[in-house]
Amino acid sequence: MRGIIIFFKKLASKLLSIFFNLRLFLAPNVFLKTEQYFYERKIENMQKSSGYADFSKLLRSFIPPSVKVLDSGCNKGFETIIISKTNDVVGADLYSSFIRIAKKRGVEAYVMDFHNLSFFKEFDCVYSNNILEHAQFPEKVVRGVNQSLKKGGLFIIGMPLDGYNLKIKDPAHFFRATEKNVIDLLKNEGFYINYKVIIDTKQKWQWKIPSANNKLLVCVAKKF
Ligand SMILES: C[S@@+](CC[C@H](N)C(=O)[O-])C[C@H]1O[C@@H](n2cnc3c(N)ncnc32)[C@H](O)[C@@H]1O
């Protein structure tokens, strides 16, 4: 009897692992977007914990006051509301349920894939907090940001650098970059680098990000 139970347990775990590996092959969009959605629903809780909250505060400090801002990947508008105290701000995110909540909170926000932004020279600043690592086609995202910005506009980026620990994979991160990958990308797509720093999140905030070897990039780039 014990042998049969062990056999079925092993079989179940084998089948599960086959399914897990096949899921992206069978229906990448359905699985990725669903899995990402369930993960991203909890981001607001992270914003309330220290580490993420401290990092976000630091990143927001690069937004010049009184200019028009796009909060790209705004989730439920948690930071969009904070930015709205000092700036004219618009939020955008892939998931309509997040945008519904952001709007209920009084924020102007749109359902939009950051690979296909439909703004044209409207913003002085595009703010992207923990967004670019989710891009399947980062060149397309940066090109869309460039198109959305006025001349001289700022692109503020905060993102984990998963390229420094390729052994560990976060399933929702597609742009697994080193600092050089991000900087080269920005330069190729028409930006100067005004400021950049890599923060060791474990040392600074006791916040462990194993996939990124605890490295978070802060970068402020300016459109030519
Ligand atoms: C890690 S969360 C960061 C949210 C918010 N910026 C913050 O720091 O609180 C990433 C956000 O990017 C959004 N996102 C992921 N892929 C996207 C896409 N293709 N287009 C637009 N938003 C996307 C997710 O829905 C999620 O809200």
Image (cartoon, grey):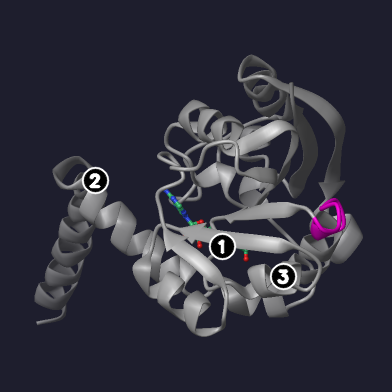
Residue numbers of the magenta segment: 60-66
Q: Nearer the viewer, residue 90 or 176?
A: 90
Reading the chain from its start, which is encountered first: label 2 or label 3?
Answer: 2
- Image location of residue 11, percent across then percent down: 14, 62
Marks 2/3 in contact by CB < 8 Å: the verdict is no
Q: Number of marks in the image?
A: 3
Reading the chain from its start, which is encountered first: label 1 or label 3?
Answer: 1
The dominant secondary structure in magenta is: loop
Give the residue at mark 1: 74
Looking at the image, residue 19 sits to the left or right of residue 132; the answer is left
Which quadrant holds the C terminus?
top right
- Image location of residue 10, percent across then percent down: 20, 63
Q: Nearer the viewer, residue 122 or 16?
A: 122
| Disc 1 from disc 2: Cα separation | 23 Å
Is residue 42 visible from the viewing direction of this image? yes
| Disc 1 from disc 3: Cα separation | 12 Å
Q: Nearer the viewer, mark 2 or mark 3?
A: 3
Relative height, residue 91 to residue 18 (above, below): below
Q: Nearer the viewer, residue 138 or 69?
A: 69
Reading the chain from its start, which is encountered first: label 1 or label 2?
Answer: 2
Is residue 168 visible from the viewing direction of this image? no
Looking at the image, residue 167 sits to the left or right of residue 161; the answer is left
Q: Is residue 63 magenta?
A: yes
For residue 84, the mark is 3
